[in-house]
Image (cartoon, rainbow, N blue to C red):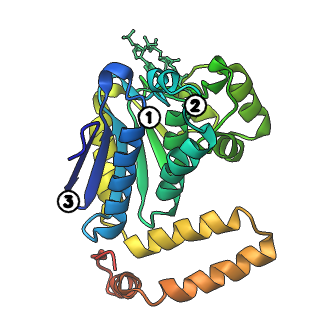
Amino acid sequence: MPTSIGFEVANGVATLTLNRPDRLNALTTAMTGEILDAIKTCGRDESVRCLVITGAGRGFCAGQDLEELQSVQGAWSVGDHLRHGFNQVVLGLRQLEKPVLGAINGVAAGAGLGIALAADLRIASDKARFSAAFIGIGLAPDTGVSWLLHQLAGPARAFELLATGAVVDAAAAERMGLVNQVVPAAEFESTVMSLAQRLAQGPTRGIGLTKRVLNRVAVLDLAAALEYEAQVQDIAIRTSDHAEGLAAFLAKRPPAFQGK
Ligand code: T3D
């Protein structure tokens, strides 16, 4: 049984709640293992058609637990800790062929920012804050934050956030392209759940293949991207949800996608 995360599935939506609120959900090695198990479950379980990641209490996630980091000084290879831990979380979220919605309830810092940015889209409460944080303890970026910030906000903003560790509020994060939408705290949960339900009722294979294409085209030139799109569309056209979407359009009725 997980102890530092909550995990529940209802109506096609899996909700993973980072749950060490007194530490702003800072990540221990054990917790990271639980997150990885939950992501794998989402991949295996056909009833899961959307994953929501959020935090308990007033934080989303404050990154690596610094008490744990202090306690293992010299006893672990940071590189290996990242390779087996946070790197797998980021890749797991990006490679999960189902929509991942980051519900950023509060502060996201360091590796916690990496997890937030690895989601496919983010809704932030107006109480959320964002900080690369690594530089505050003399570290370079990890957990994909360099790459993700560069992609989302561009090189100058990425450098600014990484080199200063500035804590930015939700409105500024939205202006920088780090979040899709900011909502008042009172409407946060209902907005997240309504979008999650909408995504969970979508053509899950088509959404998953869309992620596959976006992941791949990031490293291709236009000609290669066009070819990759053509290959993946050959897969999408054979899904039941494509047949349903087409039939529903022609019959002028709403589609009932099954995620297959
Ligand atoms: O080996 C490896 O894999 C290394 C990998 C490293 C990846 C990283 O993530 S490095 C970056 C680690 N994270 C940080 O440096 C962020 C540290 N936290 C902060 O800078 C601030 O807490 C925040 C800006 C995130 C929020 O500030 P604020 O004022 O809202 O809250 P606070 O009062 O600082 O924190 C509340 C409590 O949470 C506090 O404990 P207390 O005083 O109530 O007993 C604080 O110590 C604790 N806390 C916050 N962040 C962490 C933490 N405890 C352990 N680890 C934390 N990361």
Label 3, secondary structure: give it.
loop
Residue placed under numbered mark 1 in the picture: 124
Distance from disc 3 to disc 1, alpha carbons, whole Å, reads 22 Å
State whether label 3 is within 8 Å of ligand 1: no
Note whether residue 242 is visible: yes
Residue 91 lies, with reference to residue 144, above or below; the image says below
Q: Is residue 175 left or right of residue 46?
A: right
Q: Which comes before the other along the chain, label 3 or label 1?
A: 3
Q: Quadrant of the C terminus?
A: bottom left
Q: Residues within 10 Å of mark 1 (few under 14, many from 20)?
A: many
Residues at circles 1 and 2 in contact by the CB criterion of under 8 Å: yes
Residue 161 lies, with reference to residue 30, above or below; the image says above
Which of the two residues, 226 or 32, is positioned nearer the viewer here? Answer: 32
Residues at circles 3 and 1 in contact by the CB criterion of under 8 Å: no
Q: Which comes before the other along the chain, label 2 or label 3?
A: 3
Residue placed under numbered mark 2 in the picture: 173
Q: Which mark is on residue 217?
A: none
Q: Amino acid at mark 2?
A: Ala
Distance from disc 2 to disc 3, alpha carbons, whole Å, reads 31 Å
Residue placed under numbered mark 3 in the picture: 11
Label total for image: 3
Q: Is residue 202 left or right of residue 117?
A: left
**At 41% from the left edge and 43% from the top edge, which residue is drawn?**
32
**Residue 115 in the image: x percent, y percent?**
49, 42
**Residue 107 in the image: x percent, y percent?**
46, 25
